[in-house]
Image (tube, rainbow, N blue to C red):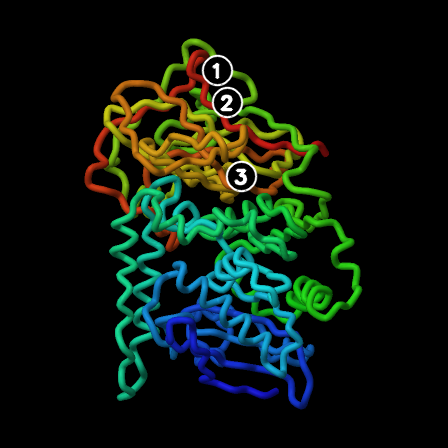
Amino acid sequence: MMVKKDVYVTMRDGVRIAVCIFRPDGEGAFPALFAASPYQYEYDDVPAYSIFPWRETGPVEWYVNQGYAYVHMDVRGSGRSEGAFGFMGKTEQEDYCEVIEWIAKQPWCNERIGGIGQSYYAMAQWFMAAMNPPALKCIIPYDGLVDHYRGSVYHGGIFCSYRPGWYIGLLANNQHRPGNEPKRPRMECDLVGDIIGHPTYDDYWKERSAYERLKDITIPVLSIGHWGKMGLHLRGNVLGYEELEGPRKLLVTGAKSVHDAHHWFDSIDFHEKEMLPFYDYHLKGIDNGVMDEPPVRIFVRGDEEYREEPKWPLDRAEYKPWYLRKGPSESLTSLNDGGLSTEPPSDGEGATEYTYPDAGWRMGVIGMGPDGRPDPIRRVLTYTSAPLEEDLEVTGAIILQLMASSDQIDTRFIVKLADQDPRTPADAEAGRQPVSVNVSKGWLQASHREKDPERSTDLRPYYKHDIPEPIEPGKVYQYDIEVLPCSYVFKKGHRIRLEISNGDSGLTDAVFQHPYHPSMVGTDSIWHDAVHASRILLPVIPR
């Protein structure tokens, strides 16, 4: 393998962009894979461990051994590249295209280029494809959101602390050098200030939203997401696939966490099975039949197996309403222990009122159990079904139609859908909660409830997030809350559980936490009577 570092490509404005080139030994023109991020190619040799979450280029040397060149770009203002970092703004997007065309002109390239990489690298691929540089023939965005505002920075209009923390780490990694090596120039981009200064979906975020331009993509796309990446990327990979009009394929894996997704992207076995055939077909012209296979492949949690589908969403999904009920379910300990049923509520079931912040919260909204251990559901609202009489598969987009009121001019809802195991007698006697697994999540700031009628569907609300509108204290509103898509089988004897709160916790939500604002002091009511029937619509797959 030939490696050439610190190769500079001059952009239209004179700024020099640094790339590292890996290619097979000897003469010849090869297809090239292109990866772009601010994560610095000089760290490509660090081990593929979870402690380095930004190592997202995949097995570079292995791809070179398969007959591909691999070009790794430090985006403008990062690593060894000149200029000012712009966090995927228009200038950075144009740089992608210029570097792609430069690669195509090199004697070692056959003028056929594919996008590669995870997370930032994947998000960059959506923009590359939307700009249609002639040499770019396909992309595989692995873990790639299409809308920074909705996908990571303001879930449902609620500020998430992940991206500011990410940027602080990026600054340190770029500027701090080991030993007495000279520090690099400061990255001048005030991304944290930009995030805080743009709390609505304005021109700043539209410029950085590939969603606005998905219809411009004409090249083949293999979108790879993971059910376990609910706070980041999952929505983008699925939504991106749905909005594309050109050749497309969707794979959603069973990765349960951020770490699983990173581990798999470093796995040669995964690349050989899932990604290399796509590149070989579109960049080498190998007729391996990959585009003749069903376009959708999803991991069905619960069944713990992959399944091929002719399309997404699934035509055979039957949406069934599950109504929030007064309860009790008598299956756990929470603020209310409400019920969840396919039968609508009766006249006398009223509303469940809760006051916040709760005196029992200790780590975010997490309380403590009788044994002194953290208890994620003890101090939140829950609505739990009776034990299921048979297996129930839920696959597709989910919507919660929540009837709620508040004594404040704004509030927020953070909801979780969970699979609850049967509670053992020993756990019940000891006051321990039943074992459960998170299936999906949703978020909505009440003042951001207005939907875009052109982009919303009956089962997937698309909020405008442009002009927050206060709510009237005491008035009951219907909030259509987008709950992320899933594919999950609730087993016979298990229960379906919905959790509702106005906060979360780093203990359960990791880095995708939504800080509790000091203005959030009040009382909300969740309604579940015959007139104000709250319900969650689940896409049930006949079995």
Q: Disc 1 on helix, strand or loop? A: loop
Q: Is residue 522 left or right of residue 448?
A: left
Read off the residue under disc 2.
323
**Looking at the figure, which quarter contains the N terminus?**
bottom right
Camera sees residue 509: no
- In the displayed structure, 54 sits above or below 442; it is below
Q: Disc 3 on helix, strand or loop? A: strand
Dot 1 or dot 2, earlier in sequence: 2
Q: Disc 2 on helix, strand or loop? A: strand
Camera sees residue 441: yes
Say which residue appears at 66% left-offset and 76% top-offset. Answer: 110
Read off the residue under disc 3.
419
Q: CA gap, disc 1 to disc 2?
A: 7 Å
Q: CA gap, disc 2 to disc 3?
A: 16 Å
The circle on residue 345 is: 1
- In the displayed structure, 182 sits above or below 220; it is below
